[in-house]
Image (spheres, rainbow, N blue to C red):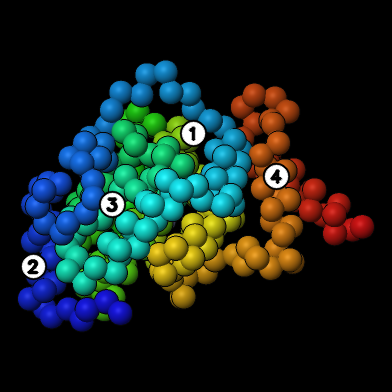
Amino acid sequence: MDRPLSEEDRTRLRYETILPVYANNGTPYLCSQEDIDDYQYFSSHSGVALLSLAESTRQLTSFLMAEPSDDIKEALSRLRHARWNSLWGPGIILKALRDIDIAFFNSCLRGKVIVRWSNTEEIARVGSLRNKSDMSGRYLGLSCPEEDLRQVTVYLNAETIFSRPTACEEMWQTVLHELMHAYFIATTGVADGDEHYDSHRQMPNSHGWVYCWLLSHVDQRARAYLDMAVIHPDEDFRLDISNESNQILGEVVAFRSSWRPPRPGLGLRHMYKAISDMLAKKLAK
Ligand SMILES: [Zn+2]
């Protein structure tokens, strides 16, 4: 169980989010200053090839479906310890990003995705500037592509997260949820499409099935190794990936991975059409 928080605790936690995070102070976590800085500053990505959406999905699917290597298990064990450390503070999530990247995102985020603590006002401003939508929801985080679409800033809302009864759990869930969006943007350079730009946590109908498919695998790994769910019970985007009737989704992901546009420039909409045709054919058998 997470420790109950008083109003003073919540105020102190929000205050701590504006302090810089150093490897040798705050909640202890086995990491170097470089590990922290890699997720606080973008690095040059010259020579890093972008993937197609299909390839990006395929790579992370096989990564998450495979038995974790020893290195990954060690990262998971450090994360488990941090998740259940009753003396946690907001800096712990920034210290843990390197291990989160190793354990859940195949080390694809380093140098491309940075994570910052933020507040409702800043998130509303950034979100409305970038996608012109109404940002007045009860959002917990925002994944926002930079001008260079291979770079993504994830904003964590200290006001909403630390207002929740289960603030610690909410902090971990929100960062994993947002990094799932950030993974797609950073690896593909594609920031449009409802699955890939996130300004909408807690709002209905905002996550596509590829997002749900991959986040369900992240959720499964987190449950197995961290004793923690990533998907909230009242959120609708968990897929039962172990259920046989849902194995068809595996086939859909495979189909999506092998799908190539019949001519350049035909985007996601055509792929979804191709997938629904494939499913219709399968169901008609
Ligand atoms: Zn989202």
**Which residue corresponds to mark 3?**
96
* Quadrant where the C terminus is found in the figure: bottom right
Residue 181 shows in the view: no
Q: Residue 12: which disc?
A: 2
Kindly state the secondary structure of the residue where label 3 is placed. loop
Q: Does 181 sit above or below residue 149?
A: below
Tell me which numbered mark, 4 or 1, is placed earlier along the sequence: 1
* Quadrant where the N terminus is found in the figure: bottom left
Q: Nearer the observer, disc 4 or disc 1?
A: 4
Q: Position of residue 26 (x, y in %)?
A: 11, 56
**Which residue corresponds to mark 4?**
254
Give me the C-alpha separation between circle 3 and circle 1.
24 Å
Q: Nearer the observer, disc 2 or disc 3?
A: 3
Q: Residue at x 53, y 30 (%)?
A: 51
Kindly state the secondary structure of the residue where label 2 is placed. helix
Q: Residues within 10 Å of mark 3 (few under 14, many from 20)?
A: many
